[in-house]
Amino acid sequence: MPAKRSGPTQPISVVTGGAGFLGSHLTDYLLAKGHRVVAIDNLVTGSLQNIEHLGGNPAFKYIQQDVTEFIFLDMPVDYVWHFASPASPIDYLELPIQTLKVGSLGTHKALGLAKHKNARFLLASTSEIYGDPLVHPQPESYWGNVNTIGPRGCYDEAKRFAEALTMAYYREHKVDTRIVRIFNTYGPRMRLNDGRVVPSFVGQALKNKPITVFGDGSQTRSFCYCSDLIEGIYRLMMSSTNLPVNIGNPREMSMLEFARTIIQATGSKSKIIFTPLPQDDPKLRQPDITLARRILRWEPKVKLEDGLAETISFFANREEGVRQKKNRRRA
């Protein structure tokens, strides 16, 4: 039986992947909203640096655990936010089996926790479930164009299975579920070496190294700042819709245009070079956020220029910290 409350208290949220890029920002947001938060992370791709500022906060608890194992919590739970998963090409290409396991077994365990606690559940899905899309922009009604056996299939199919499992729990067990399809998001706490385009371009630009653009740079992405995304996800959890909702910024730009934007924003001397396009790399990516606008009254507010300034500042400070550590070791 679910744990019972003895009286009115703060809402309690469990965030899997709570030490990751988005999971840690979500944790901060929930704490600011008055939630007690339990963050669960095995630190395969997450980092304690992302949550170290929460040390000593009585409303926050961290548990180091692989969420593919049984999740036991001796407390009531109101919301389960399932964000655990490698989320960058480098990570899921190096960790294909772990990626598939967290999308399947991890989602099963997180849903089981929500069912046991009678909690509302939100799955952090992805625009990657659309694959290399034949419909543009991508609405939630589009079923996708995914290569199940390609190198990206481990991530795409893990998320597609997670969506199917979430809907099965909604229909079979009446778990109150939500699904967010997250489009390219950026901001502080991303890892410089995680393989995603924003940290890759920024890292290269800060060092005045050549910026490597895949293909001819004509492929497009749409970038949403992390605070906008988290606001949209929170609104989705608090809404009444059980079907998937796209959250992202519909401002679309080519990778060549984006590389030039990064060079300008950093004042870098970097040149642009071109490398072969990875297998199954999507040529187009732009969310149709009609549903989010209508149901959630949400749309992104942070301008790309402002979000990049915050992100570049974070990476520059992180790089300076690394340099200082190296100098101290030499001394």
Image (cartoon, rainbow, N blue to C red):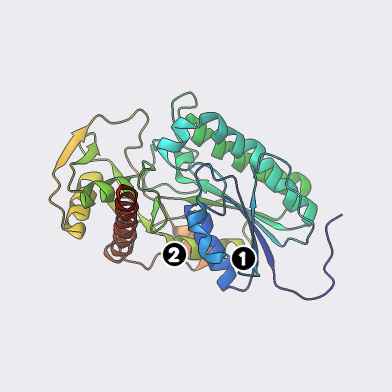
- Location of residue 280 by image quarter: top left
- Mark pair 1, 2: CA separation: 17 Å
Q: Quadrant of the N terminus?
A: bottom right
Give the residue furthest to the bottom: 8
Identify residue for label 2.
Answer: 227
Give the residue furthest to the front: 331
CB atoms of marks 1 and 2 within 8 Å: no
Q: In this orientation, does residue 267 appear?
A: yes
Identify residue for label 1.
Answer: 238
Q: Earlier in the sequence, mark 1 or mark 2?
A: 2
- Location of residue 309 by image quarter: bottom left
Name the residue at 74% across, 46% down.
112
Which amino acid does the dot numbered 2 rest on?
Ser
Looking at the image, is 275 positioned above or below residue 118? above
Looking at the image, is 119 positioned above or below residue 326? below
SS category of the residue bearing label 1: loop
Residue 187 on image: x %, y %: 38, 58
Residue 13 on image: x %, y %: 66, 62
Residue 240 on image: x %, y %: 64, 62
Other residues around mark 2 within 10 Å, as few (<14) / some (14–19) / many (≥20): many
Question: Depth check: 86 or 257 in front?
Answer: 86
Residue 35 on image: x %, y %: 64, 69
Image label count: 2
Q: Nearer the viewer, mark 1 or mark 2?
A: 2
